[in-house]
């Protein structure tokens, strides 16, 4: 009995000591690193100004960077650069035709067969709404083309989010009067639409964020805000010559697994938004906000299967909704640029989105929000990162090694 009492007392004392000691936190994972190399952007012809790099894209052995220039008085004009390797760049001539087009900052770029198309905007008018223009490469330069009439600041104006190129031509994704929509074009000189994208089974408000070419058609990704639910559901639409079809997400089944969700995640793939999508081999991978961080999904015409989650341990004081501003695929890897309350961050995945590591940036990344952007693109064996820190630009490229 005495021996048993001593053992019990010792156990209780150990428990008290353990309870009084704070639990050890797991050591943070060491970020992956790349051999970042700085890029110098040449000044475009015309009046000088600070470069505003907003989006970067690559296809068919050609890289494009779009954005604008801001002069000392705060006036802006569109700008674009081209490169054969992501390391040495030259300025493209840019010709705006409209009053606001000549003041555009180009914020989204698409690429097809080594040719560029872009979306730009400038706030203006009585209500300060974005005045949007579409752009296409003609000859050796970039020229403004007519935008949809309701993209110019009308009461039911659209929000043009992204532009993508592929075998079927060009596709602009966005929203019109609260409905996810797309605008297709065969050659980038004129766009049809808007073509409204239906919500999933339970209705709700669909939102389209990005698109990727698939054979002769498109995959558009986004989200659906479902009445009665706090979290949006991921959404995928497939379009081709036969029209547009919605992936069969069961957004009405609260707590139930989404159609296309991986059985192992217990339906976790049901909540989230798909902000960016890229082709990776024979598949497409999308990344967007999920729960308290970010998530990746394998997407296809039948829906989305949840992959890896990341970034849930980040916290900051600046507020703001989490968002994905860039997603690149190259050398079998994915690189994502995200923004949340802790600021911008880079991430890398070597297993098609199943797991992610923090990626050390080439320089301190800015806080999210305001006049700041971080974008990424990949092709071949390298990746390019472009940063606009409120008029303090930076562009870097790196070979994709073991990471």
Image (cartoon, rainbow, N blue to C red):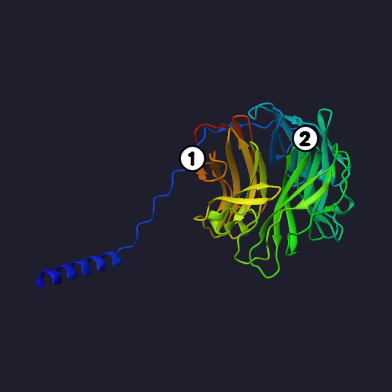
Q: Is residue 119 left or right of residue 313?
A: right
Identify the residue shown where x is 87% and y is 41%: 145
- Asked if 18 appears above or below 241 in the picture, the reply is below
Identify the residue shown where x is 79% and y is 57%: 198
Residue 168 coordinates in the image, percent (x, y) = 81, 38
Residue 209 coordinates in the image, percent (x, y) = 72, 51
Identify the residue shown where x is 79% and y is 61%: 178
Could you classify mark 2 by the number of other residues whose Cα lies within 10 Å: few (under 14), some (14-19), or many (20 or more)? Answer: many
Q: For residue 367, say whether it is visible.
A: no
For the N terminus, which image quadrant?
Answer: bottom left
Residue 16 coordinates in the image, percent (x, y) = 25, 69
Q: For residue 249, say whether it is visible.
A: yes
Between 13 and 3, the residue placed more toward the observer is 3
Judged from this view, the residue extending furthest toward the left is 2
| Secondary structure beneath label 2 | strand
| Secondary structure beneath label 1 | loop
The earlier-in-sequence mark between 2 and 1 is: 1
Could you classify mark 1 by the number of other residues whose Cα lies within 10 Å: few (under 14), some (14-19), or many (20 or more)? Answer: some
Circles 2 and 1: CB atoms closer than 8 Å: no
How much space separates mark 2 and mark 1, taking CA atoms? 31 Å
The residue to which callout 2 is attached is 116
Between 6 and 356, the residue placed more toward the observer is 6
The residue to which callout 1 is attached is 32
Between 367 and 189, the residue placed more toward the observer is 189
Q: Is residue 66 left or right of residue 158?
A: left
């Amino acid at each position: 009995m005495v021996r048993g009492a001593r053992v019990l007392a010792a156990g209780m004392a150990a428990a008290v000591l353990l309870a009084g000691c704070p639990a050890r936190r797991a050591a943070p994972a060491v970020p992956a690193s790349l051999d970042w190399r700085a890029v110098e952007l040449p000044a475009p012809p015309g009046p000088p100004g600070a470069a505003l790099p907003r989006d970067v894209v690559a296809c068919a052995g050609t890289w494009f960077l779009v954005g604008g220039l801001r002069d000392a008085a705060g006036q802006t004009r569109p700008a674009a650069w081209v490169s054969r390797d992501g390391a040495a760049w030259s300025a493209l001539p840019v010709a705006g035709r409209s009053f606001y087009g000549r003041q555009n900052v180009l914020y989204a770029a698409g690429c097809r067969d080594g040719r560029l198309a872009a979306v730009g905007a400038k706030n203006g008018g009585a209500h300060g709404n974005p005045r949007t223009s579409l752009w296409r490469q003609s000859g050796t330069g970039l020229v403004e083309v007519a935008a949809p009439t309701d993209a110019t600041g009308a009461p039911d104006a659209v929000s043009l989010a992204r532009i993508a190129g592929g075998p079927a031509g060009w596709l602009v994704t966005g929203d019109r009067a609260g409905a996810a929509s797309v605008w297709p074009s065969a050659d980038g000189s004129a766009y049809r639409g808007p073509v409204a994208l239906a919500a999933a089974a339970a209705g709700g408000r669909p939102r389209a964020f990005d698109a990727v070419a698939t054979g002769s058609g498109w995959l558009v990704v986004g989200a659906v805000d479902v009445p009665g639910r706090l979290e949006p559901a991921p959404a995928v639409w497939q379009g081709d010559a036969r029209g547009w079809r919605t992936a069969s997400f069961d957004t009405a089944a609260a707590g139930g697994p989404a159609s296309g969700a991986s059985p192992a995640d217990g339906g976790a793939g049901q909540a989230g938004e798909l902000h960016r999508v890229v082709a990776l081999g024979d598949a497409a991978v999308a990344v967007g906000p999920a729960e308290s961080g970010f998530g990746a999904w394998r997407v296809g015409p039948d829906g989305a299967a949840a992959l890896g989650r990341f970034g849930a341990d980040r916290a900051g004081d600046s507020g703001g909704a989490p968002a994905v501003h860039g997603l690149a695929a190259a050398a079998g890897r994915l690189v994502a640029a995200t923004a949340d309350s802790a600021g911008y961050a880079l991430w890398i995945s070597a297993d098609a989105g199943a797991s992610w590591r923090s990626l050390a940036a080439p320089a301190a990344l800015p806080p999210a929000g305001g006049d700041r952007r971080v974008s990424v693109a990949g092709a071949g064996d390298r990746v390019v990162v472009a940063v606009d820190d409120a008029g303090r630009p930076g562009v870097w490229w790196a070979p994709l090694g073991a990471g």
